[in-house]
Image (cartoon, coloured by chain):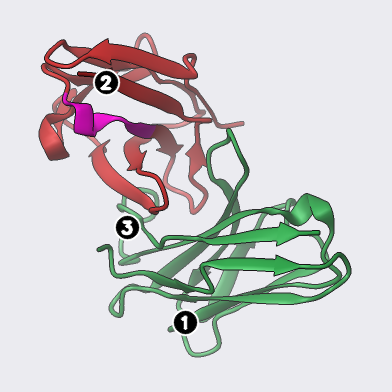
Chain colours: A green, B red
Amino acid sequence: DTGVSQDPRHKITKRGQNVTFRCDPISEHNRLYWYRQTLGQGPEFLTYFQNEAQLEKSRLLSDRFSAERPKGSFSTLEIQRTEQGDSAMYLCASSPGRIAGQETQYFGPGTRLLVL
Amino acid sequence: AQSVAQPEDQVNVAEGNPLTVKCTYSVSGNPYLFWYVQYPNRGLQFLLKYITGDNLVKGSYGFEAEFNKSQTSFHLKKPSALVSDSALYFCAVDTGGFKTIFGAGTRLFVKA
């Protein structure tokens, strides 16, 4: 058990609906990452937080996507007006946040989204 | 731009034989290289990483990887494969920023 939890584990929604996912990182970790993984591909970086500050966003993160980490603890990822192309596994990871680029990331089990 | 290539979609090996899962990378600075493993219905788990120093890195479950700067490779190896090693393996690279680039993954199948 890595200590990172994600909720829900599975989500089925209809096209056009909004969905929100939650990630609870390892408690002492300052960095939190969101990734998207589609079948047959590796995780693709979406966004990254250092404490409560969102420091980088991928171009994959369209205007329909928003992420927050309001108190530097848990994070939420919201997708508005979902599209079938949003169907994927959404992964959250955390790391201590002391040395950029060198740290092991600890991944949660993921939230699998299916948009009908 | 940073990139990672895992040239084999699947590697098949008999239990007890040595295994190699290949990874090559392209970065503009010094690379930090990682291997993660993904079991069905579970998140990615860290195996090992190269940051600096000895080119041969040892990690979890008997795995090791060798950093080869001239060939820009970081192949994952294990002297004797187990059926329980069957999983999806990802190579990843970072250069000190905040964005980790993952390869597409290689599925390892170990036959008893």
Residue on which disc 1 sits: A74
Q: Position of residue B32 (x, y in %)?
A: 35, 37
Tell me the chain of label 1.
A
Q: Position of residue B95 (x, y in %)?
A: 44, 40
Tell me the chain of label 3.
A
Quadrant where the N terminus of chain B sits is top right
Q: Are marks 2 and 1 on the same chain?
A: no
Q: Nearer the viewer, residue B6 or B93?
A: B6
Above-or-below relation of B73 to A15: above
Q: Give yes or no for contact between labels 2 and 1 (Cβ–Cβ under 8 Å).
A: no
Q: Position of residue A27 (x, y in %)?
A: 30, 80
Disc 2 residue type?
A: Val
Q: Position of residue A52 (x, y in %)?
A: 51, 81
Crowd around label 2: few <14 · some 14–19 · many ≥20 (10 Å): many
Please check the rendered image and state whether residue A49 is part of the magenta-colored stretch, yes or no: no
Disc 3 residue type?
A: Ile
Disc 1 residue type?
A: Phe
Q: Nearer the viewer, residue B95 or A80?
A: A80
Q: Nearer the viewer, residue B35 or A21?
A: A21
Side (left or right) of A25 relative to A53: left
Instruction: Residue at 88%, 69% (x, y): give it.
Output: A16
Side (left or right) of B55 relative to A16: left
Crowd around label 1: few <14 · some 14–19 · many ≥20 (10 Å): many
SS of the residue at dot 3? loop
Q: Inspect this view and state whether residue A46 appears.
A: yes
Residue on which disc 3 sits: A99
Residue on which disc 2 sits: B110
Which corner quadrant of the image does residue A67 belong to? bottom right
The magenta stretch spans which residues? B82-88
